[in-house]
Amino acid sequence: MNDRQRAGEPRANSAPVPVVPAPHQGTGSFGSRSPRRRRFDTGAIRGPATLEVMSPRAIRSSTAPTRTPGSPRSPRRTGSPRSRGVAVLLAAAAAVVAAGVFAAGCAAITGVTNPAGAAGAGAAASAPIAALDDGFLGAVSPTPEATISPEPGSWNAVTPPAGYRVVLISAGDDSATTTLSTAVRAWAEGHDVVFQQLRAMTDDEVEERIDQAAASEPDLVIGAGAGVVDVFALITGQYLAQQFLVLGAELPEPTANVTSVIWPGAMFRGTGLGSSGEIDPTSVTARRARDAIAAGSASVLHGHTGIVLDLG
C-alpha cells in the first residue's frame, strides 16, 4: 500500500461498487410495508430517522393551493348578494303569475262559479257562522241516523262563509233533478260559494263523479235527487273525511258524514226499499228545493251531520 492509497484515494483501476436499493423502499412516507424493515439513505440523513404521520386535515392544508399576494380570491358562491336577491324576487313574481293563471283556468272549467274564492277554503273554515234558531233542533240532541223536523225558517240566519266550496253531483235530466240543481246553483251564487256541478247519466258515472269530487276536497259534496242514492249508499262510506248532503232523498244507512233532507214525495231510500209513494216528482218545487239546500247546508255548517232533516 503506497502513500496515496493510505490517504484514502481510490485505486486507478478499481471498479465502482454498485448500490443495491433497499427492499420495498418507496418514495413517500408510507413506502414500506413493514416499518421495522424500512431503510433510509444514511448519506442524506444524519442521526435517527423519524417518520411523521400527518392527519387528513394537515394533508388537505398542505396540498391546498396558496394564493399569492395581490391575486384575486376565488369566490365560494357565484353571483353577488345583489344578483341573488334579484333572482329571489323574480322567482316570487313567477309564483304570483302562476297563481293568477291557475285562478283564470278555474273560471274556464264548465260548471264552476266564483273561482276567485277557491283560495279561501281556510278562511271559510275559520269564519264565524250565525246561530240556528231554537226551533231547528228543539229539545233534541240528534244522534247519527236520527230524523229531526226543524221548524220552517229556523235555518234562515245561517249562511255559508265566502269562499265555501261545493260540488254538486246530479244524475239524469228529469224535472226533479233539474229543479234541485237550479236551486243549489242559485244558492251558491247568492252567497259567494265556489260551485261546480258534475253531471252523470249512469250509476258508473255517478261513482266516477264522487271520486272526482272527493279528490278535489271541497267543503261539501251535494247529491241531487233519487238518481244518486244507490251509488251514494255504497261509496260515501269510503270518504269519511268528506261531508256529503243529499237533497230530496236519503240513504238507508248513512254514515256520520252524510246528511239528508227529505219531505213528502221526496223520500226515496234506495232501489227495493220503501214504496213507490215515496217518489213524487211534482213535490220537488222551487220553494222546497230552496228550503232543502238552506236547511241542509246550515245543519252541516253547525256540525249536525249524519242525520235526516224532514221538512214535513
Image (spheres, helix red, strand yellow):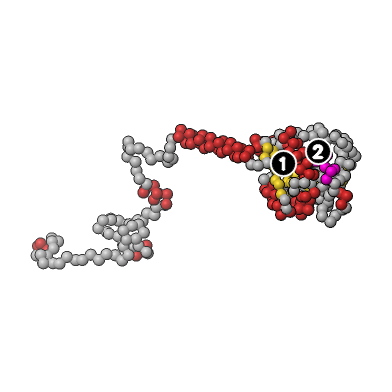
Q: What is the x, y in percent for residue 276?
A: 87, 52
Helix, strand or loop for disc 2: helix
In space, the residues marked 1 and 2 are separated at their CA atoms by: 20 Å
Name the residue type under label 1. Val
Q: Is residue 230 left or right of residue 3?
A: right
Front tag of 1 and 2: 2
Label 2 crowd bin: few (<14), some (14–19), many (20+), radius 10 Å: some
Indicate the quadrant containing the N terminus: top left, top right, bottom left or bottom right.
bottom left
Indicate the quadrant containing the C terminus: top left, top right, bottom left or bottom right.
top right
Could you tell me what secondary structure mostly forms the magenta stretch?
helix
Q: Is residue 278 above or below residue 90?
A: below
Name the residue type under label 2. Ala
Give residue 286's mark. Answer: 2
Q: Is residue 254 above or below residue 104?
A: below
Q: Is residue 238 above or below residue 91?
A: below
Q: In front here: 75 or 135? A: 135
Residue furthest out toward the right? 139
Q: Quadrant of residue 135?
A: top right
Is the Cβ of the residue at disc 1 closer than 8 Å to that at disc 2? Answer: no
Q: Is residue 250 left or right of residue 80?
A: right
Label 1, on which residue? 166
Label 1 crowd bin: few (<14), some (14–19), many (20+), radius 10 Å: many
Helix, strand or loop for disc 1: strand
Magenta region, residue range: 281-296
Q: What is the x, y in percent for residue 56?
A: 42, 52
Q: What is the x, y in percent for residue 181?
A: 75, 42
Q: Specify whether residue 207 is in view.
A: no
The residue positioned 63% from the left and 38% from the top of the image is 107
Q: Is residue 20 left or right of residue 207?
A: left
Q: In front here: 2 or 85? A: 85
